Image (cartoon, grey):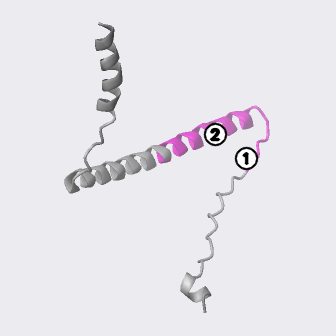
Amino acid sequence: MNALILALLVGLPGLASARLPAPTEEQKAKQEEAKAKTAEANAKANEQLATAQDRVAARWIQNQKAKGVTVTPTPIAPPPAPAVAAPTPSPAATAK
């Protein structure tokens, strides 16, 4: 009985480590389509979130003005563009 359990414990991890076959062109196309759909949905959700946040902020500022409090919103600057690395010269160009 112990030998059977030992054989199962040694043999089962080998079965679980099998590699999956590479995706077919059709599967790759479906994955790309799903990525595009997800990206579009995320962009729409982010836009809706920003709109909702703007409405909440405008309502809060309006309520504060009604109370006689002056509110000055802090302007938010967009994040800077990522730095572009300078192209590295090819090894053939440096060997001259």
Residue 87 falls in which quadrant of the image? Answer: bottom right
Disc 2 to disc 1, C-alpha distance: 9 Å
Q: Residue furthest front?
A: 3
Of residues 17 and 54, the one nearer the viewer is 17
Say whether residue 39 is left or right of residue 12. Answer: right
Q: Secondary structure at mark 1?
A: loop
Residue hosting label 2: 57
In the displayed structure image, the side of residue 72 where residue 96 appears, left or right: left
Q: Which residues are magenta?
A: 47-74
Q: Is residue 86 magenta?
A: no
Q: What amino acid is found at the position of numbered circle 1 in the picture? A: Pro
Badge 2 amino acid: Ala
Q: Where, quadrant-wise, is the C terminus in this rendering?
A: bottom right
Residue toward you, 13 or 7: 7
* Residue 62 highlighted magenta (yes or no): yes
Q: Are marks 2 and 1 in contact (CB under 8 Å)?
A: yes
Closest to the observer, 65 or 18: 18
